Amino acid sequence: MLNDRWRVTPQAQLSFASLSLNDITGPAGEQVNFRNARSTRARVGAIFDYSPEMAGGEDVNVFISANLISEVSFSPTVDVTAGGITNTLTPRRTRSQVELGVGGHFGVAPNARLGGGVYLTHDLRSGGRTDARGQVSFSLRW
């Protein structure tokens, strides 16, 4: 906590995902073989949270978040065989991304909060794309 109004929360995350699917035969007799897909991602960043003093004592806070996300390992591959020819499909790997977000929460009742945020994620690759997403939340304590 920086002071009564500002808080900084450092964050770090390591996530692993694995997917295994059964092979299928398409309508034209093509064989589709799904190889096991695995992904490991690392994320480091921080949330900067501000709680202004409101005249009526309302429960309000706003935040800014910043994260660096890195794809440590990535291995989804699909083989499609048709007419004796096998094509291997491998998606382009996202190496590193920067994510920035802004949002807030406010109390709508003594035990309920409404909030949300908007996040931009930019791929650091040359010519990388930028994605936007929004989030709305409602929390109730009882």
Image (cartoon, rainbow, N blue to C red):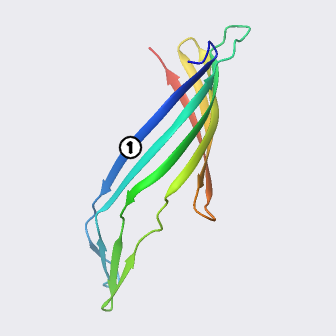
Does residue 70 appear left or right of residue 123 in this picture?
left
Q: Which residue is mark 1?
A: 14
Q: From this viewpoint, which residue is outermost toward the bottom?
A: 83
Other residues around mark 1 within 10 Å, as few (<14) / some (14–19) / many (≥20): few
Which quadrant is home to the C terminus?
top left
- Which residue is painted at 60% across and 18% down in the image? 2
Which quadrant is home to the N terminus?
top right
Q: Is residue 24 above or below residue 136?
A: below
Q: Amino acid at mark 1?
A: Leu
- Which residue is painted at 41% across and 50% down in the image? 41
Q: Is residue 10 above or below residue 21?
A: above
List x then y, in percent, for residue 136. 58, 35
Q: From this viewpoint, which residue is outermost toward the front?
A: 2
- Which residue is painted at 71% across and 7% down in the image? 56
- Which residue is painted at 58% across and 45% down in the image? 99
Q: How many numbered marks are there?
A: 1
Q: Which quadrant would residue 66 be assigned to in this image? A: top right
List x then y, in percent, for residue 8. 56, 25
- As helix, strand or loop, the secondary structure at mark 1 comes to strand
Q: Is residue 45 above or below residue 22?
A: above
Q: Which quadrant would residue 22 be assigned to in this image? A: bottom left
